[in-house]
Image: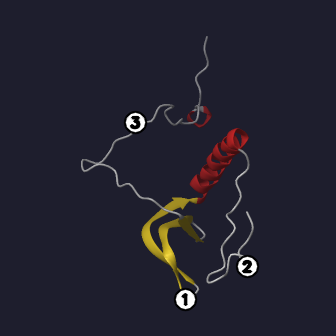
Amino acid sequence: MPTKQKPSESAPARIPVAPQFIEPKDGLMLVYANHVQISQSAFDVKLGFGEILGVEEGKARILKKVSVTITWLEAKILNDLLSRVLTAYESANGPLAPPKLIKLGATPSESPKP
């Protein structure tokens, strides 16, 4: 005779395997960013995305575009996903390195060599 499970012994709830994505009626907002600023609290992580417009008087001018706040768990998942994507990209295309910055007002002989 089968035994009945107690409520505390039931299987944990599971997230559906295939999510259903629903887009807003007006469509998705598309944003280009080449600058990310991160801030944090005890509860979540905020990613601020912007676009570097140029440099004036030694200061980068950055147009703030959008801010996304996620939980620490989602930040961990995002970190894992980005690590996998970057590893695959570098395996196919070679290592990525930050660009060498050109000194403002420098003569060609003072700029970094490629």
SS category of the residue bearing label 3: loop
SS category of the residue bearing label 2: loop
Question: Which of the two discs, 1 and 3, labels the residue nearer the N terminus?
Answer: 3
SS category of the residue bearing label 1: loop
In contact (CB < 8 Å): disc 1 and disc 2: no
Pinpoint residue 18: horizontal percent, then vertical percent.
Answer: 47, 31
What residue is pinned by disc 1? 57
Question: Which of the two discs, 1 and 2, labels the residue nearer the N terminus?
Answer: 1
What residue is pinned by disc 3? 20
The residue under the point 34% across, 41% down is 22
Residue mark closest to the camera, 2 vs 3 = 2
Vertical relation: 88 (above or below) 100 = above
Pinpoint residue 40: horizontal percent, then vertical percent.
Answer: 59, 70
Mark 2 to mark 3: distance in Å? 54 Å
The image quadrant that residue 114 belongs to is bottom right
Task: Please state, as top left, top right, bottom left or bottom right, where the N terminus lies in the image.
Answer: top right
